[in-house]
Image (cartoon, helix red, strand yellow):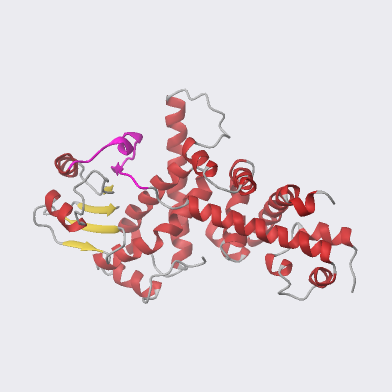
Amino acid sequence: MTMECAAARALLLEADPAELRGEVDSPLAAHLRACADCRSQADAILAGEADLDDAVRAMAQPSVGTRVIPLRPTRWGRRMVPAATTFAALAAAVAGVMLARPHPAQPRGATTEQIARLMFPAPPVARAAAGQSVAVLKTSDPGVTVVWVY
Amino acid sequence: MRTPTTGAEPMEAMVARARAGDERAFAELATAVRGQVHRWALVRTGDADDAEDVAQTVVIRLHRHLHAFENRSRFTTWLYRLTASAALDWVKGRGRRERAHLASADPGALSGATDDRIAALENQRTAALVRSFFAELPARQREVFDLVDLQGFTPAEAGEMLEIEGVTARAHLFRARRAIRERILAAHPTTRDDR
């Protein structure tokens, strides 16, 4: 079955990526195998969508910085620099769950556990393995759990 | 990326352990899904700064509500809906804050944080494409296109995640593809001249 280039180019705009890659058997896929011009258009679409995917993936990386977000998040949170004492006071004040990330200004080399001990003198600490970025801190108040994203 | 990976342990096993109260498993689960949630939030809100806030809110809600997950849907679907709900709440809050501050910016304009990240893209064509993706596509089209064509979910799965019919998801997908691909072909040097 043959297909005119004009018809193929209309289909290119809505075809599944697998069809553009020639992974399925269809009139459009057959035309793309036979027509270099239409093939180049399909390749351009696939490359553009791959670039878009890469860009969105890169944009979705969390940025380095510190924000403390209480239960009702507000913009002021992102401007806070939570020194340990400030952080501890805030933790005591917020009756519920809050979430935080360490700030680069914290002591160089301090581990999550070291910072947690400053904030909560003797809590059991559960955290993911090294290199991961969420910790759950139990406090002496059973009604307060800290979920720390850093 | 279709399903967030957790290294050696299957996602289902990690979810089960976290649901049973294992905080270490929760921390590992939250870490594993954080990047995926962040991407969903970014595509949903169109704002890099808001996406970070939404992603962190989702981690908290995941901790609070994981016990309510009953395996009647896939964990990924349930997590997406949790993210969508958090994003909706956040966007509503953003609207209130913007009105409170009498913001004069174009409501369709990208935030400074998103704009900065787009500007940082080295390839100008890609930057223009990303700007178009976020600024011109309706949110629902953007979500379906990202889920299906960029992340590999089926239209039926995307429909389930978005709580719309599969046929509706496909309609959004086709409109989004047409808009994105026309933009790609218009900018591509090897195709621009013969169009």
Residue B54 in the figure: left or right of residue B106: left
Q: Position of residue A130 (x, y in %)?
A: 27, 65
Q: Position of residue A137 (x, y in %)?
A: 20, 57
Q: Which residues are magenta?
A: A64-83
- Give the quadrant of residue B169: bottom right
- Give the quadrant of residue B165: bottom right
> Residue visible at 25% across and 38% down?
A81
Q: Name the quarter where the N terminus of chain A is drawn.
A: bottom right
Residue B142 in the figure: left or right of residue A131: right
> Residue visible at 47% across and 56% down?
B81
Q: Nearer the viewer, residue A36 or A69?
A: A36
Q: Nearer the viewer, residue A107 or B113?
A: A107
> Residue visible at 12% across and 50% down?
A118
Question: Is any atom of residue B163 visible in this view?
Answer: no
Q: Position of residue B129 (x, y in %)?
A: 64, 47
Residue A123 in the figure: left or right of residue B17: left
Residue B78 in the figure: left or right of residue A53: left
Residue B154 drawn in magenta: no
**Image position of B72 with respect to A120: above or below:** below
Question: Is any atom of residue A77 visible in this view?
Answer: yes
Main secondary structure found in the magenta portion = loop
Q: Position of residue A54 (x, y in %)?
A: 55, 57
> Residue visible at 90% across and 71% down?
A2
